[in-house]
Amino acid sequence: MRHADLRRRWRAGLRWLLMVVLSQPALALAAPAGGPLLAQNDDTTRPARPASTESGTTVLYPDIGEPYRSIFSQIVEGIQQRSRGRVFSQKLGAATTSQEVLDELRRNDTKVLIALGRNGLRMADTLNSGLPVVAGAVLHTSENDAATVQLHSLAPSPVLLFTRLKQIAPATRRVLTVFNAAQNGWMMKLAVDAARQQGLELVRYEAADAKAAARTFQEIFAEAERGRDAVWLVQDSVAVDDTVVLPYVLEEGWNRSIPVFSSSLAHVRRGALFALYPDNLELGRRLGSAAQVAAGSGTARGLLPLQDTLLAVNVRSANHLGLRVNTTELGVSLVFPTP
């Protein structure tokens, strides 16, 4: 792998890590706490552009600071590489109204929208433009979010996760997980088939709230067998509470030598064995390609897991579990603890 590509992946991982551990993630991935949802053009000092003679794609995404800005910029770069026609970027901030966004769409003869982040998704829904919408870079997705759009979740594909699990901890035969049905019912459907493909038994426990999740994890670790079982932490704000559930799971996994792997990058920094996280440029390329298909068909729907991923590994946890991890052979992009 070229050094330039390694540096790109390393920077991408650090940006995602910063994003998920910042104290105000809602700035990028959730709607503002109050007031109308507004938008801001890339350059508010420019006069209005004349109508474009070439139809194109418009990307809606939040206008906020780092590390979010670099993440969205990389995704947009990937979209541009896969899009036919022009790509227009519409940053969502506090300067212009949704009506002005609609005016921009008409002026640019937009045929398909790409919405990034929760703000982008909310704006696309608010516009009611009638255009097909492809969305991505949204945390904690559900099937309801994809009722009228094609939504590419940030939750990694279980096929990719379980493939990595067998590479890193090949003796694993059973995967135990706790989930909230509203957030991850769709993911569990995919996970059943993914586990079967890898010769794994998937044991799923549903939790309605954080207390139920905590009790379930206690039961899991009371019965988990070293060398056979692994615990999967899904992206779930109910079942995997960061303040209570996560510390307990990581501590019990360490004490009992049970591998804990995750769908969230930040968990690897805190001790999870490994996680998959987005390759921003490749995600953008996928969104760009999907948008071209949607523009041709006039529609786009469905909830899809993240397919374009990079690998982060906690070598301290791997060593504690007696696992030999060759970071070069596995193509690891981020290593924790940081050397």
Image (cartoon, rainbow, N blue to C red):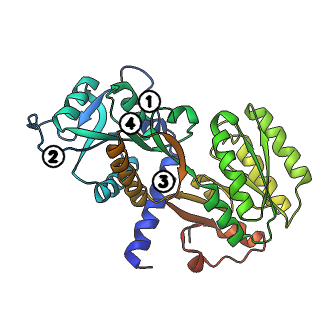
Q: Given this view, does label 2 or label 1 mark the residue nearer the observer? A: 2
Of the numbered discs in the image, which one, if any, rests on residue 54?
2
Amino acid residing under circle 3: Trp
Q: Given this view, does label 3 or label 4 mark the residue nearer the observer? A: 4
In this rendering, does residue 34 appear at all? yes
The N terminus - image quarter: bottom left
Task: Identify the element where label 4 is drawn.
Answer: helix
Amino acid residing under circle 1: Ala
Residue to which mark 1 is pinned: 31
Residue at mark 2 to residue at mark 4: CA–CA distance? 23 Å
Residue at mark 3 to residue at mark 1: CA–CA distance? 19 Å
**Which residue is pictured at 21% across the width and 41% down the height?**
42
The C terminus - image quarter: bottom right
Query: Who comes first in sequence, dot 4 or dot 1?
Result: 1
Residue at mark 2 to residue at mark 1: CA–CA distance? 32 Å
Task: Identify the element where label 2 is drawn.
Answer: loop
- Mark 4 residue crowding within 10 angstroms, few (<14) / some (14–19) / many (20+): many
Q: Quadrant of residue 103?
A: top left
